[in-house]
Amino acid sequence: MADPTPVIDDLRAEGDELDALVGELSPDQWALDTPAAGWTVAHQIAHLAWTDHHSVLAVTDQPAFSREVEKALAQPGDFVDNGAEEGVQKPPAQLLTDWRAGRHALADALRAAPDGARFPWYGPPMATASMATARLMETWAHGGDIADALGVTRAPTDRLRHIVRLGVRTRDFAFGVHGLETPFEEFRVELTAPSGELWVYGPEDADDRVTGPALDFCRLVTQRAHRTDLALEAVGPDADRWLDIAQAFAGPPGGGRPPKGDGA
């Protein structure tokens, strides 16, 4: 069983990096529009705070989390946006305090989880490392939207390896959620990390393969950029189709982002 400590440590570091970006924002900056339609910087942090809170419930109070699932079933398609809207009603200072408290509580809860624990979620149950990876992925992706709104360029780190692994592992989910037949054979995935290391998945002799920068792959599977704006290459029809539909997050297919040439 893999030790979840490294990904929990990286989750904490990803949150700290985003905290440094938003910790001193003015009220006007909290109200800036981000690339996510209808969401300001405050919406992005409110969403992270909401999801961290629900993650803590899933880890520490499963009956309470079950009640939240019932609420979600009563408002399918709206409960995530509603959570963000509720958060942005708070003053930025309170929203920031709540987000900090929630993400620290989640990291502590995940560290205290017993070996082999599995937690309920809005999709399939998750192990400790999977929960931490999902939260890191969301923190990085929403943090990127915030950075774009602020006109800031973030230097990528090798924490992306967790998102890459998640993106590779969710290949079959992406095909299934689009109602497509899942490829039988594994793909070869070769991605260059920010450090220059080569991250490799799948058999060397695979017919279908994906190559390129790990950063671009992460932007693709979190649907933060259109594939035509990324330096990813696909060999084989199934790999090519994957790059059109890839998503590392649970739930229905996301809308993605339009190519920059379309006015994005």
Image (tube, helix red, strand yellow):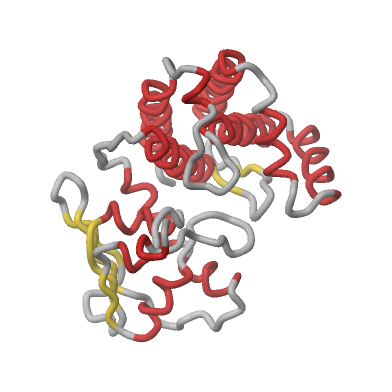
Foreground of the two, 33 or 213? 33
- Tally the numbered discs: 0
Residue 191 x %, y %: 23, 60
Foreground of the two, 26 or 252? 26
Report whether residue 13 is seen.
yes
Foreground of the two, 253 or 104? 253
User: Does residue 239 appear to the left or right of 54 in the view shown?
Assistant: left
Residue 205 x %, y %: 23, 81
Quadrant in the picture for residue 201: bottom left
Foreground of the two, 177 or 184? 177
Q: Is residue 36 above or below residue 236?
A: above
Q: Residue at x 56, y 27 (%)?
A: 106
User: Does residue 149 appear to the left or right of 101 in the view shown?
Assistant: left
User: Does residue 121 appear to the left or right of 227 in the view shown?
Assistant: right
Q: Residue at x 24, y 64 (%)?
A: 231
Q: Is residue 246 above or below residue 248?
A: below
